[in-house]
Amino acid sequence: MDHFQYRDGVLHAEDLPLSAIADAVGTPVYIYSRATLERHARTFAQALSILPRVHIAFAIKANPNLAVLRLMRREGFGADVVSGGELARALAAGMPAQDIVFSGVGKTHAEMIQGLEAGIGQFNLESEEEGIELAAIAAARGQTAHCALRVNPDVDARTHAKISTGKAENKFGVPIDRAVEIYTRLAALPGLDMRGVAVHIGSQLVELEPFEIAFEKVGALIADLRAAGQSVTHADLGGGLGIPYKAGEVFRTPAEYAMMVARVTKDWDVTLMFEPGRVICGNAGVLLTRVIRVKRSSNQAPFVVVDAAMNDLARPAMYGAWHDFDAVEPRGEKMTAHIVGPICETGDTFAMNREIDAVATGDLAVFRSAGAYGATMASSYNSRGFVAEVMVDGDKWAVVADRIEPAAISAAERVPNWLD
Ligand code: LLP
């Protein structure tokens, strides 16, 4: 359930008509609902409260906006970060370092130092090589890095290939059948406190079964590690829970997910960690756009050209992802159209032959479910700027990220004098 609903024929974010934001900030603009973010965070946390010891680290890659992070902090969430930039954001948003987990296959030397300096709670190691490097840095600084070993369980997440992470051929984690050996060697190194295992098999999972298969394997691994004399006090089960992108779709709920986790992990005796991203913020945001014109040609559906493009919302171009498209003030008629942005490549297509609210030049419309992996994946392709972001709270609202104009981007560029 989200707080983007029609009132008197006008789409609102909470108590605010979206047209008011378009008038004040222009389009395209991402709009987040405070109440929806909060509701999703609470639903997720509440579902997991049936488990004995839980730590939730919001996967900030899904939406790293500082206002969103501050809200997550208010809900008691920590952060899952994958770069020095994300780590800095988490700290800037007031996340205690202890509640931060650093994931990712390519942590650099500098990022490891940054994590140690901040005193983050856990590094999720993705290879033995990474563990050896981190051990040396930590030991030289007289510190101990608390770590989990991310394993690759070789499980098909049954999601889009580009966002599957738990198959043997994916770059993530160490092969689960080598995990005891690698964990044991890393645990012997000064500078490291190997305290657990981590797994994340992919994103936008619409079934619970792949999670369950992966978690069963992790349970067996924990038993093997303990049998080998290793200590395991934490298990990070990653993120990945999918969300509905089409009106009327019904998915597995956080409560069902939590019950499955409770069943599979009942004998683990660990602190369970979670890294949800999309399930918290995906349906808490829309991308508001304006129709530039409707281009009609003789023998096919018209092109609705909107002022948002693949640089603002990359998911349709990148993954063929579906985002519902709704007029802000629907007239009650429908049309079948292709929805495209202004960018000069055919990939800049949001939908083909889609039945949508009939729209005309100047109309406002939204792409729904754009709160996760939306603004954060934007680029400035075609010398378009970076889109603004707004957060609504009841009938108040605030710009939480300024629009970055093309001129501000080109201001960072230099023409060397030897080109004169
Ligand atoms: N933990 C790790 C280690 C991850 O790699 C990810 C997402 C998450 C947690 C959060 O997953 P979530 O709960 O959001 O599914 N750009 C793609 C999604 C990429 C996901 C990458 N990793 C998209 O737009 O669909």
Image (spheres, helix red, strand yellow):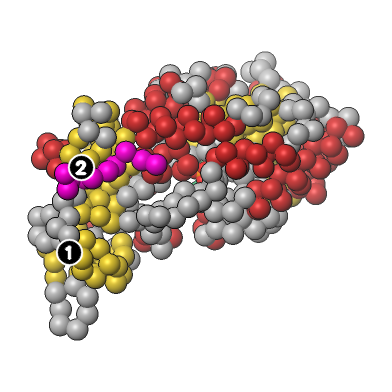
Residue farthest front in this picture: 8
Residue 56: assigned label: none
Dot 2 falls on a residue whose secondary structure is strand
Q: Quadrant of residue 221?
A: top right
Question: In the image, is residue 8 part of the stretch drawn in magenta?
Answer: yes
Residue toward you, 120 or 207: 207
| Label located before the other in sequence (1 or 2) | 2
What residue sits right under mark 1 in the picture?
333
Q: What amino acid does circle 1 point to?
A: Glu
Identity of the residue drawn at 54% across and 29% down: 46
Residue 111 location (% of width, % of height): 53, 31
Distance from the alpha carbon under mark 1 to that under mark 2: 18 Å
Q: Is residue 86 left or right of residue 389?
A: right
Q: Is residue 239 left or right of residue 403?
A: right
From the viewer's perspective, tell me whether residue 217 is left or right of residue 91.
right
Going by the numbered disc 2, the residue's amino acid type is Arg
Disc 2 packing (10 Å; few <14; some 14–19; many ≥20): some
- Residues rendered magenta in the picture: 1-11
The image quadrant that residue 53 belongs to is top right
Q: Is residue 76 above or below residue 35?
A: above
Would you say 226 lies left or right of 271 here? right
Nearest to the observer: residue 252 or residue 183: 252
Q: Residue 239: give x, y in percent of width and height.
A: 56, 41
Q: Residue at x 32, y 50 (%)?
A: 368
Q: Residues within 10 Å of mark 1 (few under 14, many from 20)?
A: few
Q: Is residue 88 visible to us here?
A: no
Provide the residue designation for mark 2: 7
Give me the residue at 23% from left, 69% from top.
337
